Image (tube, rainbow, N blue to C red):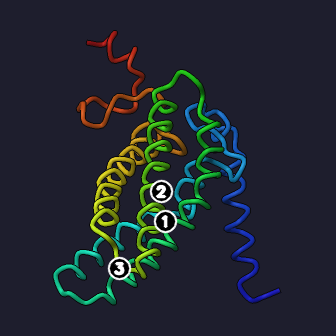
Amino acid sequence: MFPGAPLYARIESTFLDRANSPLAESRTHAPRSPFCASSATSLKKKPRGRGRRNTAVAFDIVALFSADTTWFTISFWMIATGIIGGLVAALPGFIDWLAIPHNTRARAIGAWHGGGSVVVLLLFIISWVMRNASHYVPTSGALVLSFVAVVLALATAWLGGELVGRLGVGDSAAHLDAPNSLSGRPASKHPQELRRAG
């Protein structure tokens, strides 16, 4: 055993005790994922390619203003790694979505988030193929696809934030049918409770 093993064992048992406690099991608003104790953990730890793809577009902009094609090459390879990350994240994301109960706002938002993310991934794949055909220097069409994909990625990222932070997919105290974060209404109450109170 290594010197810190007793401390590690205590931390691990504390975490496992919390994850398996009756209180954790009674949270019906936190759907379980087959990948870990709660889907929030998998949503936070899933490999994602969004950041690399969005950063690649920033490098495209630098290349356009500096006329240095090295930035296009860097962007090409960042898009490639972002595509791989997006493909790896797709299956756990789909399985997490399947764990969300039917006929909830979270299920609908999850479908929009996942569908939008697939479209973003496809746009970047097409842009990457166009760049590969032109030896890493993007055509104007490849640049337009990347820019549109980034704008759509911002929208899907916001929807992902709604899932975890607002609708309680995971460990939040919110409800799966919580109102939109832009509505100004509290997330912790079910919409039917809000209608009765109002």
| Marker disc for residue 49 | 1
Q: Which residue is disc 2 drawn over?
A: 121
| Amino acid type, callout 3 | Val
Please report contact status of discs 2 and 1: CB closer than 8 Å, yes or no: yes
> Callout 1: helix, strand or loop?
loop
The mark closer to the camera, 2 or 1, is 2
Direction from residue 159 to residue 40 in the image, left or right: right
> Farthest residue in the front direction?
133
Spatial separation of the CA atoms under disc 2 and disc 3? 20 Å
Residue 154 versus residue 124 in the image, above or below: above
Q: What is the C-alpha distance between the residues marked 2 and 1?
A: 9 Å
Q: Amino acid at mark 1?
A: Gly
| In-image side of 143 versus 177 (left or right) | left
- Vertical position of residue 153 compared to residue 73: above or below: above
Among the 4 quarters of the image, the one containing residue 112:
top left
Identify whether 28 is placed above or below 113: above
Percent x, y for residue 119? 45, 48
* Residue nearest the observer in this picture, 148 or 159: 148
Q: Position of residue 187 (x, y in %)?
A: 36, 33
Q: Are marks 1 and 3 in contact (CB under 8 Å)?
A: no
Who comes first in sequence, dot 1 or dot 3? 1
**Residue 39 or 154: which is nearer the viewer?**
154
Q: Position of residue 111 (x, y in %)?
A: 50, 36
Dot 2: within a 10 Å radius of its alpha carbon, few (fewer than 14), some, or many (20 or more) residues? many
* Residue on which disc 3 sits: 137
Within 10 Å of disc 1 (Cα), the crowding (few <14, some 14-19, many 20+) is: many
Q: Quadrant of the N terminus?
A: bottom right
- Say which label, 2 or 3, has the lower sequence index: 2
